[in-house]
Amino acid sequence: MSDRVAIDVTIIGGGMITNDLILPSIYHLERMGVVKNISVCALTNAPLRHLKESQELQQAFPDQGFHAYPSLSEAPDKMLPDLYKEVLAAMPSRQAVVVAVPDQLHYPVVMEALKNDQHVLCVKPLVLKYAQAVEIEGLAFERGLFVGVEYHKRFDRRSLMARRRYALGHFGEFVMGEAKMIEPYYYRHSNFQNWFTTDKSDPFTYVGCHYVDLVYFITGLQPVEVSVSGIKGKFPNGNEGYMWANGRVRYENGALLSVINGLGYPDAGAGSNDQCLIMYCEGEDGTGLIEHDDQYRGVAHCYLDEIGCGGSRYNYVSPDFYRLVPWSGGPRLGRGGPGAMPVGYGYDSIAATINMIAHIENEVTSLDVAASLLKRQGIIRETDQQGIIATPANSSINELVTEAARLSILNDGAWAKIVGGEKPRVEMR
Ligand SMILES: NC(=O)c1ccc[n+]([C@@H]2O[C@H](COP(=O)([O-])OP(=O)(O)OC[C@H]3O[C@@H](n4cnc5c(N)ncnc54)[C@H](O)[C@@H]3O)[C@@H](O)[C@H]2O)c1
């Protein structure tokens, strides 16, 4: 092993995304020598017990584990909503905090992490208000702390190919597009029913933002107007939420993207969700086209029993986002069995930010306080400008779209516009 500094990682939130993507990715980075101590903090210890007892995680990462907050000896229903503050305060400075709590808690948790001098990786959407994204960007820069936002579609090779070719002018200019992301019906039975209520979120805000970010990532075009209509329904616990959303985004050049989203992909479907993007572009006496079938990518498995990786025994098992595959070993192979490793753009995206944080800290180990801050700020600005890892500076247009979308959906689909200038804001058209 090299003498590179490894960083501690604390994940705040122990729910679905932590189980399905974040924790396995962090475990893998631990055995690659990038990450040192791992902690996970949730509202209660129930999800932490689930993570500890997961057969899949135990098989893939034998001999690895995390510090649980609340500890597993607490009562499983005891809620400790402020425990994360104590956990963050106890961390050595300039380690990494992964924020994976419900959308409306991102802002307070990210701010608390920054105030405790921690670098941050936040699941999308960073926050629900543009002003909050600006505040986060300012505080992080002032302290030389890196904030990455987990818009993992940016790391899909097809997105990177499209961005490069678009910049080279090979498609022409985006003019008309359609995107879709329909998540599984069974989400309605999950913890979603406690927070995905009409006043807080909707399917456009929750997953439409992936494609809105992606079209911006590929084209660099700024959205200027948003209209989102929703269809309400009841969760099993009686809470009301938007189960479906139909949105339209207009861009600065007049282009239009329509986006449909929902919590309704059939549980028996082979999906395991339904997603795609199509973009038409105008060129000189011709049109260009970008078409991504992001659901069916050419691999199907039919298992003898249901093994829970899609709704049914017959599954489209795209290897592109996230899968565990056999691991042939690495720096820490000696610790236990080889298990499995995560592959796909979901892992690549997490690894990009965690590696960036580790890189920043390794660059400054021998610098004095002032030089270290300058160096860290320089790397942050370079990353902002490069525009591959989503940061508050290069992705906060998404917060304006989200704000406009929430304004629109609560006004029955009326258009909301993004007013630019020094202090961008949203208002009804
Ligand atoms: N494709 C994606 O990028 C993607 C996919 C799924 C979820 N997400 C995002 O991840 C976030 C979490 O989603 P999820 O599906 O894991 O939700 P979830 O409801 O399954 O889990 C939320 C977790 O947050 C924890 N939590 C709530 N309040 C807390 C507090 N005060 N302190 C500590 N922990 C607290 C809960 O205990 C729970 O473990 C959301 O912002 C969601 O939008 C992103």
Image (tube, helix red, strand yellow):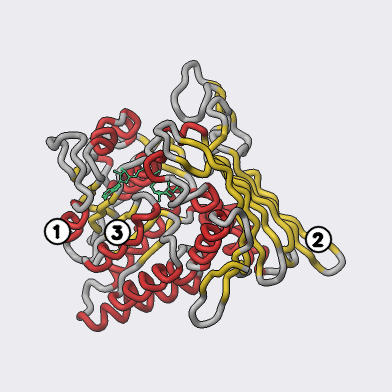
Res. 109 mark:
3
Q: Amino acid at mark 1?
A: Ala
Residue neighbourhood size for the residue with mark 3, other residues' Cα within 10 Å, grouped as few (<14), some (14–19), many (≥20) = many
Does label 2 or label 3 sit earlier along the sequence?
3
Q: Where residue 260 sits: x, y (%)?
A: 62, 47
Outermost residue on the right side: it is 285
Please tell me whether residue 131 is drawn above or below residue 154 in the rendered image.
Answer: below
Q: Where residue 64 sits: x, y (%)?
A: 24, 39
Judging by the rendered image, the residue that carries numbered circle 2 is 287
Residue at (58, 47) in percent of width and height:
230
Report the quarter where the N terminus lies.
Answer: bottom left
**Visible in this render: residue 404?**
yes
Residue at (70, 71) in percent of width and height:
253
Please tell me whether residue 296 is drawn above or below residue 12 in the rendered image.
Answer: above
Residue neighbourhood size for the residue with mark 1, other residues' Cα within 10 Å, grouped as few (<14), some (14–19), many (≥20) = few
Residue at (84, 63) in percent of width and height:
286
Q: CA distance from mark 2 to mark 3?
A: 45 Å
Is 144 or 273 nearer to us in this picture?
A: 273
Q: Secondary structure at mark 1?
A: loop
Looking at the image, is mark 2 or mark 3 nearer the viewer? 3
Q: Amino acid at mark 3?
A: Val
Please tell me whether residue 305 is drawn above or below residue 168 in the rendered image.
Answer: above
Q: Amino acid at mark 2?
A: Thr
Judging by the rendered image, the residue that carries numbered circle 1 is 90
Does label 1 or label 2 sit earlier along the sequence?
1
Is 357 or 39 nearer to us in this picture?
A: 39
- Mark 3 vs ligand 1: CB under 8 Å? yes
Is 145 or 249 nearer to us in this picture?
A: 249
- Mark 1 vs ligand 1: CB under 8 Å? no
Does label 1 or label 3 sit earlier along the sequence?
1
